[in-house]
Image (cartoon, rainbow, N blue to C red):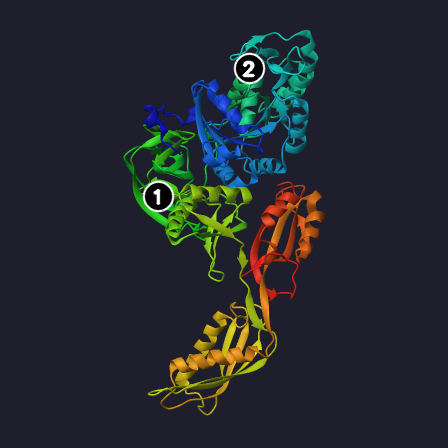
Amino acid sequence: MAQRNHDKGVTGAPAVTDPAKIRNVVLVGHSGAGKTTLVEALLAATGTITRAGSIADGNTVCDHDPAAVRQQRSVSLACAPLWHDGFKVNLLDTPGYADFVGELRAGLRAADAALFVVSAVDGMDAATAALWEECAAVDMPRAVAVSRLDHPRADFDEAVALCQRVFGDNVLPLYLPMLGDDGISTVGLLGLITRRVFDYTGGLPPLVREPDPEHLPAIAESRDELIEGIIAESEDETLMDRYLGGEEIGTDLLIEDLEKAVARGHFYPVVPVCAETGVGLDALLEVLTAGFPSPPEHALPAVTGVDGSPRPPLTCDPAGPLVAEVVKTTIDRHVGRVCVVRVFSGTLRPEQTVHVCGHGLADRGHPDHDADERIAHLYSPLGATLREVGVAVAGDICAITKSGSAETGDTISAKDDPLLIAPWEMPEPLLPVAIVAKSRSDEDALARNLARLVAGDPTMRLERNPDTHQLVLWCMGEAHADVVLDRLRAGGVELDTEPVKVALRETLAAPARGHGRHVKQSGGHGQYAVCDIEVEPLPRGAGFEFVDRVVGGSVPHNYIPSVEKGVRAQMERGLVAGHPVVDLRVTLVDGKAHSVDSSDAAFQTAGALALRDAAEQGQPTLLEPIDEVTVRVPDGNVGTVMGDLSGRRGRVLGTEPDPDTEGRTLIRAEVPALELLRYAVELRAMTAGAGTFRRHFLRHDPLPDHPTTTHQRG
């Protein structure tokens, strides 16, 4: 994120001081729906930028990341504020590809309303449908923009019908597209409430006129349905009876009730838009500013003291306690760490000392941290451009730079009253990628760059596997992994990937006896230790037991712990294939010692030799980790997914309807971890991106002699 304003001489951006004049809107939809192009068109239409860029040319405001330019699709969250009719609208452009769902979650956290962008050509994917249900669960206001009307295969009516089938009731268009003389191109809109034509053949603003006679039947039919939907959500219970009685409901009253219903999240207007020609952009801006709620109207996340102590609910009050949250972190080569921040309460000012607090993500490589830092400057982020502002009040989104500790998900609060915001839901990364630096010098650069990436991406987990000694990046999918690796290489790191190894275990399948004799004499004090042990397998997960059953002092009491220490060391080293040994009971039954030559080291060695001797007759067995897996899929994919799990040597335990989402099923199974290395990618392919899963370690089971898997073992 380059600080281009300094290069271009831009001194700043207008600041907003009234939260009621702010709108925070996240754009969501599948990859290719046209979100970034629509943001570009809105920025140009409001004069925020002089000319709209294009994805093909790699010069859009939001897709400034080199990976986004190369792949020609969004890979990260971007903020693009604009001003319209006295309102500041912070547009949050999110990636549509499932691998970058973490960026989407951050956008949802920072927003007060969601604009679903649905292509009039390609419809929508299952992930978009699932996201609608998530927004419904938290009562987030929503609207729909049907995009790409300029495409020859665009079908607005079918797109609306699809939205109504998938999204449910009260998804109704406010306008209908008006075709040109060629019968193909969209040149205007038919306003259903006002019964006016908005003609864009001369550009923005459109020419407003009376409809032609051929437009009246379409307007009348769709208008009746729209008005009934608005009246059904009206707070005036007499309005429906008046309407059904033939009374003409005034336009101003309809618009007022419409705006209230949209802000409450009970009505979902559909607006046709064409980013290329500008059709519908002004209508969409009216929905964003007049229909969507201001920050004070939207519920705020819960907050506690840093120690977890309860605190009163927040209100969006510029004079309240300072509470803000880092929703995105990037590292810029010139500026350093850049944090995009949503201010929920209070006011953030330059030269202010604040408390930065991050708790609860230690398992993702983000240790708990608390620090006091001074904020030198505040900026309004416009994609990659940072424009300095003098203040950021409750409800606004800003950027800070050069923080020493702030990471994505951290809370920023007052130094004298530090607080902690309840974290948003972070998806679990489930695709492992093992990386290795090409040289010793690259190892230092790799460590530095990984620390920067982990600070900004809570959907990536870094793991140094103690069993396989691999450095593993856990990512959301292949596209996410490609972006992470590209960013590492762009930071000057030469690296390779290698097959991921799964840590196995060893055990003995049958009881055995072992004899360990360590006797050496080479002048001076020698080494003398003899021990006899009995070994028997324990149930899976029982661990290790050491039993002393020596009689008569054949092994002096002070050397018995030495035997145990030697046995444990050999178990760590493995018996056959170098994997740790588990689930054994080792009983020391006899031995011999020498008054001069016996020692702690000698009996450690004898204990290890005894266990190795026992392994030769105790049927050593490899164990593989078994994970308990919960797969969440649409009902239509249940059979395919269950069959695939069985093909992975999995044992399906059962299915049940998803309690959170209608039309989805939870499948529970036990699956070898060896079979899950690429399951994040393969499940997505089987379910067209609609399937998700969770996993956790359950136990170790014997590894078949010839497992069907082609994956690597540690």
Q: From this viewpoint, is residue 191 visible? A: no
Question: What residue is shown with label 1?
Answer: 356
Q: Is residue 354 left or right of residue 273?
A: left
- Identify the residue shown where x is 53% and y is 32%: 72
Residue type at the position of mark 1:
Val
- Identify the residue shown where x is 66% and y is 64%: 706
Specify few, some or many for label 2: CA neighbours under 10 Å numbering under 14, 14-19, or 20 or more: few
Give the quarter of the image for residue 183: top right
Q: Nearer the viewer, residue 171 or 157?
A: 157
Q: Is residue 184 above or below residue 421?
A: above
Q: Is residue 464 above or below residue 20?
A: below
Specify few, some or many for label 1: CA neighbours under 10 Å numbering under 14, 14-19, or 20 or more: many
Q: Position of residue 675 (x, y in %)?
A: 61, 56
Q: Position of residue 541 (x, y in %)?
A: 56, 68
- Identify the residue shown where x is 69% and y is 17%: 221
Q: Secondary structure at mark 1?
A: strand
Please name which of the two marks, 1 or 2, marks the residue nearer to the observer. Answer: 1
Give the quarter of the image for residue 155: top right
Q: Is residue 403 above or below residue 712?
A: above
Q: Position of residue 632 (x, y in %)?
A: 63, 47
Give the quarter of the image for residue 264: top right
Question: What residue is shown with label 2?
Answer: 252
Sooner in the amino-acid sequence: mark 1 or mark 2? 2
Q: Is residue 566 above or below residue 553?
A: above
